[in-house]
């Protein structure tokens, strides 16, 4: 499972001209799921995300977590995070999980985030053509891969 975590001042997701969700301070999480992912990946990744100290404290130092700031989150599925660009110029998405595997894991990721944050998170629609807007704060962008926990 791969995730791009972006600290945002605001973010929203729109599908077919209808805004599905919008947040102020928090994180926008783009998550890519592969066939080998399990609930263990979800648990590790969500725990890492909610506890990442990427928000400024009173002295302007990144020392606060999403939980500590009571920030919000939006989770968007993004299979392109598993793009392979080794050969040619057309990315291959062979490592990305097919919908029958990815959708249940995506839904479990959302449920786990909501449980850990003790609040609802915004979401996109799996597989939809989404318009994602954000104001990256910092900018702060963190890449995490559960298969490479270094």
Image: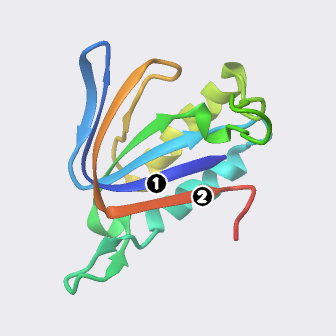
Instruction: Give the x, y percent position of residue 149.
Output: 70, 66
Label 2 Cα neighbours within 10 Å, binned few <14 / some 14-19 / many ≥20: some
> Foreground residue, 93 or 5?
93
Please give left or right for residue 110 compared with residue 122 in the image.
right
| Label drawn at residue 144 | 2
Please give left or right for residue 54 compared with residue 60 in the image.
right
Instruction: Give the x, y percent position of residue 44.
Output: 63, 58
User: Seen from this angle, which residue lies furthest front?
Assistant: 88
Q: How is the image coloured?
A: rainbow
Residue 33, quarter of picture:
top right
Residue assigned mark 1: 5
Label 1 Cα neighbours within 10 Å, binned few <14 / some 14-19 / many ≥20: many
> Foreground residue, 117 or 123?
123
Instruction: Give the quarter of the figure containing the C terminus.
Output: bottom right
User: Seen from this angle, which residue lies furthest top?
Assistant: 16
Residue at (49%, 61%) from the top-left corner?
Answer: 142
First in residue order: circle 1 vs circle 2 = 1
Instruction: Give the x, y percent position of residue 147.
Output: 75, 56
Residue at (58%, 37%) from the top-left corner?
Answer: 108
Element type at mark 1: strand
User: Seen from this angle, which residue lies furthest bottom?
Assistant: 59
Residue at (31%, 12%) from the top-left corner?
Answer: 16
> Foreground residue, 1 or 135?
135
Real-space CA distance between mark 1 and mark 2, rounded to the nearest whole angstrom = 8 Å
Residue 133, quarter of picture:
top left
Element type at mark 2: strand
Q: Is residue 119 above or below residue 150?
A: above
Mark 1 touching mark 2, by CB under 8 A? yes
Residue at (60%, 34%) from the top-left corner?
Answer: 80
Q: Is residue 38 above or below residue 143?
A: above
Q: Is residue 79 above or below residue 36?
A: above
């Amino acid at each position: 499972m791969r995730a791009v975590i972006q600290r945002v001042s605001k973010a929203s997701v729109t599908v077919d001209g209808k805004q599905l969700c919008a947040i102020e301070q928090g994180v926008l999480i783009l998550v890519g799921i592969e066939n080998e992912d399990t609930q263990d990946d979800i648990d590790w990744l969500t725990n890492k995300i909610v506890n990442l100290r990427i928000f400024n404290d009173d002295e302007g130092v990144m020392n606060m977590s999403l939980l500590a700031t009571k920030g919000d989150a939006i989770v968007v599925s993004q299979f392109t995070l598993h793009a392979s660009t080794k050969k040619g110029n057309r990315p291959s998405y062979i490592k990305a999980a097919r919908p029958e595997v990815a959708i249940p894991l995506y839904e479990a990721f959302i449920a786990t985030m909501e449980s850990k944050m003790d609040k609802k998170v915004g979401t996109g629609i799996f597989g939809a053509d989404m318009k994602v807007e954000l104001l990256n704060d910092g900018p702060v962008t963190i890449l995490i891969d559960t298969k490479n926990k270094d």
